[in-house]
Image: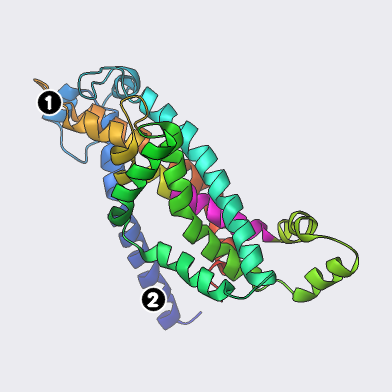
Amino acid sequence: MTPRLTFHRVALLAMLLLFAAFFLTPLYVMLSTSLKSMDEVRTGTLLSLPATPNLQAWAKAWSQACTGTDCGGLQPFFMNSVWMVLPAVGVSTLIGAVNGYVLSKWRFRGSEFMFALLLFGVFMPMQVVLLPMSQVLGWLGLASSIWGLMLVHVIAGIPSTTLFFRNYHVGLPDELIKAAMLDGAGFWQIFWRIVLPLSTPIIVVTLIWQFTNIWNDFLYGVVFSGADSKPITVGLNNLANTSSSVKEYNVDMAAALIAALPTLVVYVLAGKYFVRGLTAGAVKG
């Protein structure tokens, strides 16, 4: 290895470490602050390590912190998000898989126009649908409920999931579909037994994408939820903005980490599959 090549590798490594430190510093500050007592927060520095780490701030953020007039912590908001996110992610992913299958392998007159209309939904501002969606939820009797919020996220996610699956399914060999049809397989048999098993990479990408978008959403959560159906993002906002005699920064930091923990866990456990899915065709076509 030449000295010039060694210098370039060291410089590249140093630059990467610098960028990593820059992006991870806020996370470090949040984590260290959440493990400190308020006395230590006041007397210490922002980057100092906790002298006696403890989880009291986490416990208070979870079950005792005030979010407006209620002082039950983030637990009910967290569970609302769980009950809303899991079905919304599953249903929107399944609908996107079927749409992508139809628009790529069972094309019909006007299918490209329909795909263009669905694609328009990817770029449409979310604020545009607030009023009409509120009216629809009112007509259906789902206003201010977890089910209504779940329906909103399913509808909002269909354009993106359809785009992902359609672009991926275009790359699947048409000969597989034709051979299955010659063997007597129907529309759904081909989908469940051939297309879906071959779509594992894009399924992982779509699940992670949808989970992250829905879990982190604030606009739909604050507009379409009621008093008993607010998601974790709304609860976190209420907690941070609830005025008290003493501002407990350690509790706020712990609450923010609790709200972000599911998405962090998903990316840590499945991040490499997300990248593999993208390179396998999620953005192809």
Q: Magenta span: helix, strand or loop, mainly? A: helix
The disc, 1 or 2, on the residue closer to the chain's N-terminal end is 2
Which quadrant, please, contains the C terminus? bottom right
Chain part drawn in magenta: 199-212
- Asked whether 17 or 179 is in front, the reply is 179
Residue 80: name its quadrant: top left
Give the labeled residue for mark 2.
Answer: 7
Q: CA distance from mark 1 to mark 2?
A: 54 Å
Mark 1 secondary-structure assignment: loop
Q: Is residue 211 magenta?
A: yes
Binning the other alpha carbons within 10 Å of mark 1 as few (below 14), some (14 to 19) or many (20 upward) gives few
User: How are the colours assigned in the image?
Assistant: rainbow
Residue at 47% x, 82% y is: 2
Q: Which mark is residue 104?
A: none
Foreground residue, 18 or 55? 55
Under mark 2, the amino acid is Phe
Residue 193: percent from left, percent from top: 79, 55
Q: How many marks?
A: 2
Amino acid type, callout 1: Ser
- The answer to whether residue 227 shows anywhere in this view is yes
Establish if 227 lies above or below 150. above
Residue found 19% across the figure and 30% down from its top = 249
**Image coords of residue 273 (percent x, y):** 58, 56
Residue linked to disc 1: 243
Q: Is residue 212 above or below residue 226?
A: below
Q: CB of mark 1 within 8 Å of CB of mark 2?
A: no
Please provide percent x and percent y for residue 278.
55, 65
Tell me if 118 is positioned left or right of 255 in this view.
right
